Image (cartoon, coloured by chain):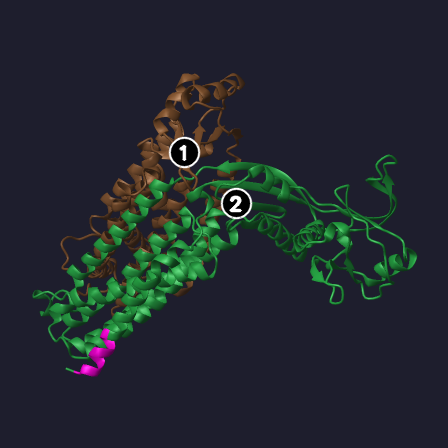
């Protein structure tokens, strides 16, 4: 017996079990659940081009970014924003929250306008609406407005920048030391007085109503939202009830855990020590998959869960294929060590081909599908890659290390039965 | 595993059985259609927020009191404190029923609760279903191309027929048993597609490997070769389907009741997927390959070489 290898095997096993047991619950809890699992709100918008601004791919990306910013301001957890078809945008917000408010924030296109003058109510002195010349709109601004603080005075301000610096230069020249009026959806946001001529297109807005960081951030967000490249019109909206209520979800997760334990036992009964190694690899598979979901901020939906179940099946399958191959090789009269080696080698090609085919199916579903189908495809592709790394590669390293440690010589420990070593039906 | 019987010789019975189930499914489907779930029907969705955890029974009684039948209606409890009831009706509530709701809330829960009544359009669900069909068909086309390159064209055809067979069996089973088809059904079908093709390829791979050792010169040796390949991979086929079935059956009995249709579809599809890889895909390949063998060797009278 080679103790070094055996200890290496034990160490790997301990790391897998210990690492998983230590952090899997926290990791699992941090994965956001999708609309179908916890219910929420589903909005489908049609993207409409503005005059002179045809829909482009980069424009759509900017739109998604802008919508995401708006939703983040809402404080809703893990929104799903997807471009669908040629010109549709789907927004899914999971959980319970003020739906009317959410719809308003996402759905209303914020029209930012800068005017040279404004209508003023003579009695109160309040600004009631825009007047004079329209100098610029939100689409002239870059979507990068943000809060800044004047280094000298410490005053809170909002930094904006124009797409075309000369436009701003002309405005600042013309309205030097005069006020301009910035409206959002017809409501006066601020009426700053231009203090200096600007050549770079960058500027700051300050005013009496902008005395807090919060007010500045809010205005910056509004400006960025106002700079949406396209109009959004609502096609359909619905609140989605969860297919699994809280209780049901808990029951399903416990059932899933019980199923895993039974699969572990089944593998040990069928393949003994090798089955135990497969179980270790399966634990690693589960852990890594959850970690990848967490790292990529993937929202778990029922179809994603279904793909994970399929992934478990394929991960187990990879090990079963390998162990059956090893048995075959022993039937052909090979020694244990060489059977393990050759069996692994022969099984690998089979596993790669079957996984590749399923992966292709997943990739096609990702490219051509949308929403739920895409969620399924993403989870499936992740499962397959993780399964190749754990159920194939890691499992192989574990098996080789264990076999070469000479801890066990009897083929029985690999699930090889008594009659198997006779050269029987497989001989050609 | 030792060969227990000649699968290829008996294959016509399996093909017949599968065809019979499929035809029966199509007939039932043509006459009755699917038993579509609320996802695919226009209806109303009522969301009521409580200040304490939801009492489902009381909610049910309340709706019955305003003359809404609670048949085919699902109540789901949501919210962080289990205090939101979402009730989905398979028909649109009349305005008279809606007006009675506030009064009923007072009668049953002591006060007028914040609620929202929405008319739900099956638009999203039907759209998703259409897209799923489309995605599966394109995926099938790409799988054909891949298998045709890695294996050969006949394997691709046989594999895809087995895949579509599994999807069809599940559809037929749902039509025959009048099981409800909802949105989760789509996830189940996608899973079955993935499992079916994975399961089939492993067997095809063994046939391909055995073909490299011996080139069959006539249909009889070809049949023997495929039969042998099937039995060589039998332990794997059985063990793999048993492990996934363990998961599906446990989820069916102990998982959430609301996903029973999903797990049921999964169970049917997994059994069908394992069955079709052995009893449909491989015999079909023998049929196709055998035909081209005959065509190629018509004039030769090669002696049968027993293996």
Which one is in front, B281 or A35? A35
Image colour for chain B is brown
Q: Indicate the position of residue A32 as horizontal and vertical percent values.
A: 45, 51
Q: Residue A59: x and y, percent?
A: 68, 55
How far across and how far down the image is residue A299, in percent? 46, 52
Judging from the image, mark 2 belongs to the subunit labelled: A
Picture layout, residue B20 above or below residue A28: above
Q: Say whether residue A5 is magenta.
A: yes
**Left or right relative to B138: residue B280:** left
Q: Mark 1 points at which residue?
A: B52
| Magenta segment, prevailing SS (helix, strand or loop) | helix
Q: Distance between the residues labelled 1 and 2?
A: 24 Å
Chain represented in green = A
Q: Mark 1 lies on which chain?
A: B
Give A350 or B183, whichever is nearer the viewer.
B183
Q: Which residue bears the numbered disc 2?
A: A93
């Amino acid at each position: 017996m080679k103790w070094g290898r055996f200890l290496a095997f034990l160490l790997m096993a301990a790391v897998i079990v210990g690492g998983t047991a230590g952090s899997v619950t926290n990791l699992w809890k941090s994965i956001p659940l999708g609309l179908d699992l916890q219910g929420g709100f589903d909005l489908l918008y049609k993207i409409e081009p503005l005059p002179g601004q045809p829909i482009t791919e980069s424009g759509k990306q900017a739109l998604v970014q802008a919508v995401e910013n708006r939703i983040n301001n809402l404080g809703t957890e893990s929104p799903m924003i997807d471009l669908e078809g040629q010109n549709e945008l789907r927004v899914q917000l999971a959980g319970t929250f003020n739906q009317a408010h959410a719809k308003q924030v996402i759905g209303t296109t914020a029209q930012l306008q800068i005017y040279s003058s404004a209508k003023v109510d003579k009695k109160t002195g309040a600004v009631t609406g825009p007047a004079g010349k329209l100098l610029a709109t939100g689409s002239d601004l870059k979507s990068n407005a943000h809060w800044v603080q004047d280094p000298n005075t410490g005053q809170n301000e909002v930094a904006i920048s124009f797409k075309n610096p000369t436009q701003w230069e002309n405005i600042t020249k013309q309205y030097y030391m005069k006020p301009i009026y910035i409206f959002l959806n017809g409501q006066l946001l601020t009426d700053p007085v231009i203090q200096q001529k600007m050549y770079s297109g960058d500027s700051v807005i300050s005013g009496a109503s902008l005395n807090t960081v919060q007010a500045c951030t809010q205005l910056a967000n509004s400006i960025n939202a106002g700079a949406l490249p396209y109009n959004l019109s609502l096609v359909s909206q619905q609140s989605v009830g969860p297919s699994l209520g809280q209780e049901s979800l808990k029951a399903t997760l416990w059932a899933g855990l019980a199923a895993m334990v039974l699969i572990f036992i089944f593998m040990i009964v069928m393949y003994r020590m090798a089955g135990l190694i497969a179980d270790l690899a399966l634990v690693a598979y589960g852990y890594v998959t959850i970690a990848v979901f967490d790292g990529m901020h993937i929202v778990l939906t029922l179809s994603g869960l279904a793909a994970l179940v399929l992934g478990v099946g394929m991960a187990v399958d990879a090990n079963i294929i390998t162990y059956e191959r090893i048995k075959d090789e022993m039937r052909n009269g090979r020694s244990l060590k060489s059977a393990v080696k050759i069996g692994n080698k022969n099984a690998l090609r089979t596993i790669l081909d079957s996984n590749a085919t399923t992966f292709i199916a997943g990739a096609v579903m990702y490219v051509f599908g949308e929403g739920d189908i895409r969620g399924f495809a993403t989870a499936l592709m992740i499962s397959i890659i993780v399964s190749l790394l754990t159920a194939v590669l890691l499992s192989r390293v574990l098996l080789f290390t264990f076999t070469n440690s000479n801890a066990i010589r009897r083929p029985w420990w690999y699930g090889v039965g008594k009659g198997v070593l006779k050269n029987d039906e497989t001989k050609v | 595993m030792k060969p227990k019987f000649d699968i290829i010789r008996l294959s016509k019975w399996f093909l017949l059985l599968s065809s019979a189930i499929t035809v029966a499914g199509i007939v039932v489907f043509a006459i009755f259609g699917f038993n579509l779930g609320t996802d695919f029907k226009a209806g109303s969705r009522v969301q009521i927020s409580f200040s304490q955890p939801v009492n489902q029974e009381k909610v049910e009684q309340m709706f019955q009191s305003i003359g809404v039948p609670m048949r085919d209606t699902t109540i789901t409890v949501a919210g962080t404190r289990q205090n939101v009831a979402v009730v989905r009706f398979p028909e649109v509530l009349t305005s008279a029923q809606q007006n009675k709701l506030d009064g009923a809330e007072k009668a049953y829960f002591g006060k007028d609760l914040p609620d929202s009544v929405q008319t739900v359009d099956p638009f999203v669900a039907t759209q998703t279903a259409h897209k799923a069909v489309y995605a599966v068909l394109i995926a099938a086309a790409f799988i054909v191309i891949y298998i045709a390159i890695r294996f050969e064209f006949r394997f691709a055809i046989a594999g895809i027929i087995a895949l579509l067979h599994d999807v069809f069996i599940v559809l037929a089973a749902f039509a025959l048993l009048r099981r409800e088809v909802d949105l989760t059904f789509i996830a189940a079908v996608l899973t079955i597609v993935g499992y079916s093709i994975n399961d089939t390829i492993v067997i095809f791979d063994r046939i391909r490997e055995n073909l490299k050792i011996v080139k069959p010169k006539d249909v009889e040796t070809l049949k023997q070769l495929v039969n042998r390949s099937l039995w060589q991979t039998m332990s794997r086929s059985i063990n793999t389907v048993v492990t996934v079935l363990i998961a599906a059956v446990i989820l069916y009995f102990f998982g959430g009741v609301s996903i029973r249709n999903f797990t049921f579809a999964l169970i049917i599809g997994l059994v069908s997927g394992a069955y079709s890889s052995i009893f449909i895909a491989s015999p079909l390949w023998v049929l196709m390959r055998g035909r081209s063998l005959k065509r190629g060797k018509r004039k030769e009278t090669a002696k049968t070489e027993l293996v």
